[in-house]
Amino acid sequence: MDEVILEEEERALLASVLCREPTTLEEAITQGLWNEHCSYKSSKLLIERFQALGTRLGGIDENAGGVRLKDGTVVVFKMESHNHPSFIEPFQGAATGVGGILRDIFAMGARPIALLDALFFGEPDFGRTPYLASRVIDGIAWYGNCVGVPTVGGMFVSDVGYNANCLVNAMAVGVLEPGQAMLSAKARGVGNLIVYAGQKTGPDGIYGSRMASKSFGVGVEQLRPQVQVGDPFKGKLLIEATLSLARRGLALSCQDFGASGLVSSVFEMAYKGNIGVRLNLDAIPLRMKGLQPWEILLSESQERMVYVVLPENAEEVLKVLQGYELDAAVIGELVQGEEIEVFYRGEPLIRFPHLRVLKAAPRLNRPMAPPFTKQGRATGPIGSFSAERLGTTLGRLIGHPGVGSKEDIYRQYDHEVGIRTLVPPSLGPSILRVYPTRDTAIAVVVGSRPFLAVSDPRGAAHQLIAGLSLALASSGATAIGMTNCLNFGTPEDPKIMYALKETIEGLAEACEALGIAVVSGNVSLYNTTEDASILPTAVVGMVGEVQIPLEEVGQKPLLPNDRLWVIEYGKPALKGSQLNRLMPAEWADEGLVSADFKRHRDLLTLATALRADSIRLITPGGGGTLISIVKRLLEQAKHADRPLALLDSHGIQLDPEFCSDPVNGFGEGCARFVAAVEPSEEPRLLKQTGLSGFKSSYLGKVISEPEVWLGQNTAARMEDLFLKYTLSLRAFLE
């Protein structure tokens, strides 16, 4: 065990709680409870802002949270980070991130039905970046495919701002059928027993939570023993065993072994239930002899759960668990009192006052100092587009790894296992049946606006929530809940804490204004290596309830002569856009930042009505409006059996008056969508839009020639754009 476990101030605080000097074991246990990764000591005061937002099920004191659909089904979902482990050992770091987020879902008694991810890497020619990216994707694919939960969506960003640290965020979605009880993480009932199940406990991952609570220096390879090793096949057995216990009412409470192992699971369960525990380390199944008590307590071995059960049900519970080939044992009992008494080799080892220690956990009000940075706000002449300049810009953007095709990633994921996936990962929200044989469906999507957040974190948060809700509306769904993962640098930096506070305020304001419940979340700090921090990166996962018939979901193709109209209440901006980030000196403006939530609610209503009327809608994403339309044309022209080969592609003739303005073509924002209609439908669209009070602008029309025209001038050939689009990730994955 390390000689220095707690910092001096925290050691003094622990001594004041204990009214004496702590032992080394007490320091080790307290470190597992008080570290940044587990206690959120730098962010807890800030994230309390989310607590009153929306009608939630589960929530901040539980493993995950959820929302109820109209038919009574509860959708449970959460997002978490596994950034530090993935930077050290990308395959297992990413794989165990998937396993961990799945455990948070089925610990609630919900069946996991979908996974999503949000991946952020540095430039492809920088250091370990290609290795990190390829191995992270391999790890996600391996665990998700083997455990049998489809990975249905995600996002991929490549930028210099992530050269020093990659980000690997994973989201899982599960369902509880109407009337099915939700399991709690609170331990209750004096005399009830604690049952352990899953893998045997080994020495892997010890001090992993402490590693995730610090910045990196040189020699990260030396930290590899602190990264856990996953087993998706055992994870699948654990899913089915836990759901079996939940269905039969045999588990009263449930908690997975996450960061800090037994210390975070049993100790925090008891704290939430305001109860004591008698814990027997001799009963815990071990993978090897000679493990010390502190190693057993802090081990982060994967695929492990604990359940609280009635004494009379213990034998049946063990029989169920062992029937799934899981190691299982009764390891403790709930008792009256404020302490956890730990036994080892038949003798009392320690009496730890967990209620007092956790209640005294530091809640830091760290200094803040605006502004975060001026990065990304370079100004320069915007000018206008010629056909040649338009084509060059299209090519540069659509070939960028953050904008181009993600087929090289998605084809490694099994996104159809479970026969629920109706709309697979492609150009917008993915759509799934909640039940394989019934018509209830949800849409899921993830997003982030880090390039705007470097100059305006609150405005970026507004735009993020508004944009994702519009993407859901354009797919035929209504946003009902969100989860988030807040990835930032070292909290000792006042500028980073200011950005975190502004981000949280922006997310809360937007969700409050749009009626979107905040059901769960995660904060990942110390994403810093040798004083180089990541961009302020808030990732949001959003769930919507599908409102249209299932036969209407999906992206109907754009066809020659289709007319394209932009419907908006405010122009986008180049500031914080992919184009601005790629060429900051050439393409920048001040532009619109904050969303107009009253107008945005009306825009969502209009988009929902048009989508229900079978009008095809496109919500612009990264790269702006023109990029999103070209990507739609390229995606629909792929061979179904050969996704990297191009069929005969349609093209687009752009209106020079509208599209020669770079802001219209490549600006990014949340205040517009594109409607594609046949010429005969055009009057009806414009009438409905006009009655709703929104501006309509003619963007252009789809043509049979496989080219992009600006007026009558050729700007780009679709075949050339397709080649850049499909090869955009090759530098990462080969």
Image: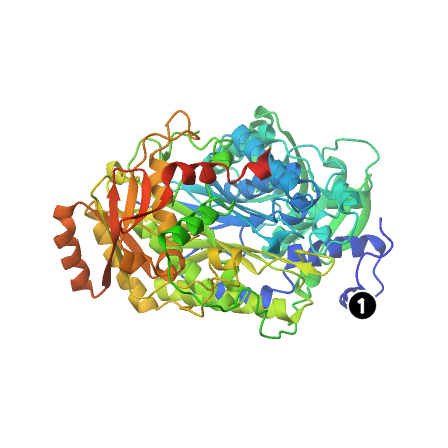
Residue 631, compared with residue 18, is above or below; it is above
Q: Quadrant of residue 52?
A: bottom left
Residue where numbered disc 1 is placed = 12
Residue drawn at the location 34% of the way across and 55% of the way down: 470
Between 696 and 305, the residue placed more toward the observer is 696
Between 673 and 358, the residue placed more toward the observer is 673
Furthest residue toward right: 3
Residue drawn at the location 56% of the way across and 41% of the way down: 103
Is residue 373 left or right of 561 when viewed as pictured?
A: right
Check disc 1 and give the amino acid type: Ala
**Can residue 73 be seen?**
no
Q: Secondary structure at mark 1?
A: helix
x and y percentages locating residue 202 in the rendered image: 74, 36
Residue 54, compared with residue 730, is above or below; it is below
x and y percentages locating residue 30 in the rendered image: 74, 57
How many discs appear?
1
x and y percentages locating residue 412 in the rendered image: 51, 31
Quarter holding the C terminus is top right
* Dot 1 alpha-carbon crowd within 10 angstroms: few under 14, some 14 to 19, many 20 or more: some
Is residue 6 left or right of 173 when viewed as pictured?
A: right
x and y percentages locating residue 136 in the rendered image: 61, 39
Residue drawn at the location 61% of the way across and 56% of the way down: 161
Is residue 14 left or right of 37 when viewed as pictured?
A: right
Between 682 and 174, the residue placed more toward the observer is 682
Q: Coloring scheme of the render?
A: rainbow
**Can residue 661 be seen?**
yes
